[in-house]
Amino acid sequence: MRRRLGIAFALLGTSSAFADDPVGCDKFKWPVDLERAALSTASQQQVASGASINTLTAQSISLKPLASAALPMAPERKPADGTFAGFVTVPNPSGGSYIIGVSDTAWIDVLQNGTYLKPIAYSGATGCEGLRKSIKFELGTAPTIIQVSGVPKNTINLVILPAQN
């Protein structure tokens, strides 16, 4: 009897967790048309983890298993076992508010001057083809490292765009 109750409570917890996830492109907290359009062309720009990229183009980044990803800093959130990670550098960003969009489940760390930047806003949804997360950051003009970890596949599409206020 106790075992059945434990299983029932576990299933209820799982159901409510999925029910809390917004589903659909219209569930993002701001319009995501630009990110989705850019990410739809990302496969045309393939780069390896560790590459330098331009801020206004989408990229498809080849990732590695976490143990061999050689991330500049440990992810702020521990990735699940068996997931992939990688990073890219934006060498000379113009300072300002930017949106970083990714196509799949991932933890995103943004680093400048050897420290983690905190996002100014976050939005995510499932069931939106091509876009899983959109995160706003305030970037300075120092070189910027964008790390992704906890990715279930060995590639992820990423775009960096000026935030539309």
Image (spheres, rainbow, N blue to C red):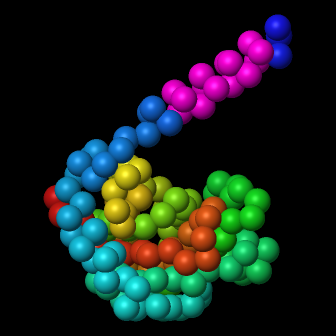
Q: Is residue 10 magenta?
A: yes
| Residue 50 at least partly seen | yes
Q: Give above or below for 149 relative to 95.
A: above
| Residue 86 at least partly seen | no
Task: Assign the magenta stretch its main secondary structure.
Answer: helix
Residue positioned 64% across, 72% down in the render: 85
Q: Give above or below for 14 relative to 116.
A: above
**Which quadrant does the C terminus fall into?**
bottom left
Q: Is residue 12 magenta?
A: yes
How many numbered discs? 0
Q: Quadrant of residue 163?
A: bottom left
Range drawn in magenta:
4-17
**Residue 144 appears left or right of 165:** right
Q: Position of residue 23 (x, y in %)?
A: 36, 44
Of residues 114 and 110, the one nearer the viewer is 110
Q: Position of residue 108 (x, y in %)?
A: 52, 63
Q: Give above or below for 142 relative to 10.
A: below
**Residue 113 appears left or right of 136:** right
Of residues 146 and 140, the one nearer the viewer is 146
Residue positioned 20% across, 64% down in the render: 33
Residue positioned 43% across, 67% down in the render: 103
